[in-house]
Structure formats: C-alpha cells, structure tokens
Image (tube, rainbow, N blue to C red):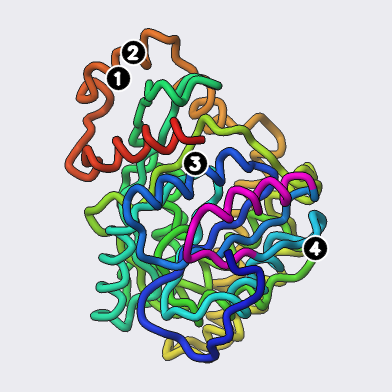
C-alpha cells in the first residue's frame, strides 16, 4: 500500500483503475479480491472519502493487496475534487477508468480498450458491455446471482461532429446503454475535465460535463466484450451533497457547462459560427435539464423498475438463475465462466 503519490511526471503505457470509495469497506474488499482473482495487471488508485472509522478499516483491507496507491480525503470533500487530485497526483498512465467500489471491472477488457485507443487517436473513450448484477440482500456469499441486460444497447458515438455524437448519446441513454462515464479514457483529457469541476457542482452535472467534453474531443465506441458488472444490490451510501434534492442538474450548473463547451468547441476543428454554437448549446444543454425537472416532479420510474421490479425477485428466482444460468436473459459470450467464478470467490472472501 502506498499512501503518497507516485513520483513519475510523464504518462506511461497502460491504464490505471481509479476506485472512489465512500463508507463501503465490504464492497471495496470484494472488488479488490475480484481483481486479484482475475490477475489484474493494472495499478489501482483508491480515493477514500469515507469516515475516519471506515478509512481505518479500508487501510487494513488494502494492506493485504499489492500495486495500490491509497489516498484519504476529508469526508466532506466533493467527489469531483477527489477525482481531480487523484488524476493529477497519482495517475501516470496514458489511459484510466473509473470503477465505483461496489461494481466490478474486467481487466482483460480494459486491455482491449487500451489497444483500440492506441490504434484510433480520433477516439476519446472505449466502452464495453455492462451486465447488471442482483442477489438476495445479505446472502451474496451463496452465489445466487442474477444478471440482467438493462444496459445492453451499445453506445456508438462515431459521428463526425460533436453535435451528432452528443445528440446520439442523449437519445440512447434512456434506453439503457453502458455509461460513458465508466469507459476507458485518455488520462490527460480526464484530468482536464475534473480540473474544471467546481466545489458546488452537482454529481449528475459532473457526469454531464465529463461526457460532453469527452465527445467534444473525440468519438466513442462500445466493443463486444464485457467491461463492467454494475451491482444493483449493494448498500447505497451517499454524502450530503448528493442527498440534496436538487443534486441532479441545476440551471446554474447547465450555464457553467454551456460556457465551457462553447470555448472548447471554438478550439476544436469544427467549423461553426458563434451564432450556431450558441443556438446548439442552448438546446442540447436544456435537454437533460428538462429531463431532470420532470424527474423532480415525480418518482424516478426507472429506479423503481430496476430496484423493485427487475431485481427484487423472490428466492425461487435466484435459485433458478443459479441452477440454469441461460434462463436469465442469456449468460452470453461476454459473460464467461471465469468472471462468474471470480465473482463468487470475491463474495465468499468479503
């Protein structure tokens, strides 16, 4: 375990897995076991914004693993600032990927993303397939897993212009697709993004800024490999900023994002008049703002479906999926046996 930043000053080949963690020691331990079982070759940077008690637990857990840079932060520090500090002071590979402490990322697929970005300089990000995981609460160690394809629609953002890429992302996002935020990305670009995140920024605004700038600077693609497993049954922990009822996306945040995008588009190679840039941004920035406004008026239907309908099945559902994996929306070729075995072992060890 390394608690100080690395001393390199230049970017090296390969990728870094960045793991923000917040008061979930068990989930963090599970992820670290999972990566170890899959012989992860990439350095890990853990950005810990937990309470003092949980930071102590995390340090004990991390001491049992290798190739980790551990950074602790005050619990009140904004996630965006934690990511900015981590990216600037502890990540020195050309590429990087975020993995929340309760999810799972597949190292072999990170390698495929790195290879693609090396060969295709016009691309800013490479995603992969994402499976959604569910299991009976408190009984994950039994391996009664159910996998769902709620994020199965590939996110292919290869249009020539930023506007086309952004509008395509907005159109596909609500249908269920791999989150661009968790793609393999170019570290230098990701650093620039999070250096722009202000302290009072809402979390969804942060993701919006990140996705938009990533698409200003290049294209994105989803490769036919399993990159991540998102855990829909883990305990949810959120800090005070995220518990704010208007944390999703605010007019102030939208205006901030609009100004940044306007400057970056003008710096890019796209030939657009100032009037067209203004008109375009006024409309595309308003789209997520209108969606957030609608969500604030009612309960988030998608969350209900994901949490209560799709994943809160009875025990028989989990037993059937355990005995007959093909019954569960196909454990297709992207979900190989090695990954499932690693998951089961990681749950048993945590």
Q: x%, y% of residue 220?
A: 35, 68
The part of the image, by quadrant, that contains residue 328 is: top left
Residue 10 lies, with reference to residue 160, above or below; the image says: below
The residue tagged 2 is 319
Q: Which residues are magenta?
A: 53-70
> Which badge, 3 or 4, is on the more N-terminal residue?
3
Q: Residue furthest left?
A: 333
**Residue 163 seen by the camera:** no
The residue tagged 4 is 200
Q: CA distance from mark 3 to mark 4?
A: 31 Å
> Which badge, 3 or 2, is on the more N-terminal residue?
3
Q: x%, y% of residue 202?
A: 72, 57
> Which badge, 1 or 3, is on the more N-terminal residue?
3
The residue tagged 3 is 30
Tell me the mark number nearer the camera, choosing from 1 and 4: 1
Q: CA distance from mark 3 to mark 2?
A: 22 Å
Residue 260 lies, with reference to residue 331, above or below; the image says: below
The numbered dot on residue 10 is: none
Q: x%, y% of residue 196?
A: 67, 76
Name the quarter where the N terminus is drawn: bottom right
The residue tagged 1 is 322
């Amino acid at each position: 375990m390394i608690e100080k930043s690395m001393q390199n000053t230049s970017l090296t080949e390969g990728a870094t897995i960045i793991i923000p963690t917040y008061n979930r020691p068990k989930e963090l331990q599970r992820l670290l076991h999972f990566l170890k079982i899959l012989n992860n070759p990439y350095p890990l940077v853990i950005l810990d914004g937990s309470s003092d008690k949980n930071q102590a637990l995390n340090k004990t857990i991390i001491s049992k693993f290798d190739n980790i840079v551990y950074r602790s932060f005050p619990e009140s520090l904004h996630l965006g600032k934690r990511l900015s500090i981590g990216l600037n002071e502890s990540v020195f590979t050309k590429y990087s990927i975020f993995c929340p402490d309760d999810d799972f990322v597949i190292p072999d697929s990170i390698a495929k993303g790195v290879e693609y970005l090396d060969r295709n300089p016009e691309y800013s990000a490479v995603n992969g397939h994402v499976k959604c995981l569910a299991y009976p609460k408190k009984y994950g160690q039994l391996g009664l897993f159910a996998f769902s394809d709620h994020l199965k629609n590939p996110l292919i953002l290869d249009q020539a212009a930023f506007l086309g890429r952004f509008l395509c992302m907005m159109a596909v996002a609500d249908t269920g697709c791999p989150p661009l935020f968790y793609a393999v990305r170019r570290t230098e670009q990701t650093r620039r993004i999070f250096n722009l995140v202000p302290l009072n920024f809402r979390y969804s605004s942060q993701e919006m800024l990140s996705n938009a700038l990533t698409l200003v600077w290049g294209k994105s693609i989803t490769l036919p490999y399993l990159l991540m497993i998102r855990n829909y049954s883990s305990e949810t922990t959120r800090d005070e900023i995220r518990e704010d009822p208007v944390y999703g996306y605010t007019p102030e945040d939208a205006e901030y994002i609009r100004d940044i995008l306007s400057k970056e588009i003008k710096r890019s190679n796209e030939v657009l008049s100032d009037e067209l840039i203004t008109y375009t941004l006024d409309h595309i920035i308003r789209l997520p703002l209108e969606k957030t406004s609608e969500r604030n008026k009612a309960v988030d239907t998608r969350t209900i479906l994901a949490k209560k309908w799709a994943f809160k099945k009875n025990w028989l559902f989990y037993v059937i999926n355990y005995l007959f994996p093909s019954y569960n929306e196909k454990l297709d070729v992207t979900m190989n046996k090695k990954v499932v075995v690693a998951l089961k072992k990681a749950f048993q060890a945590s």
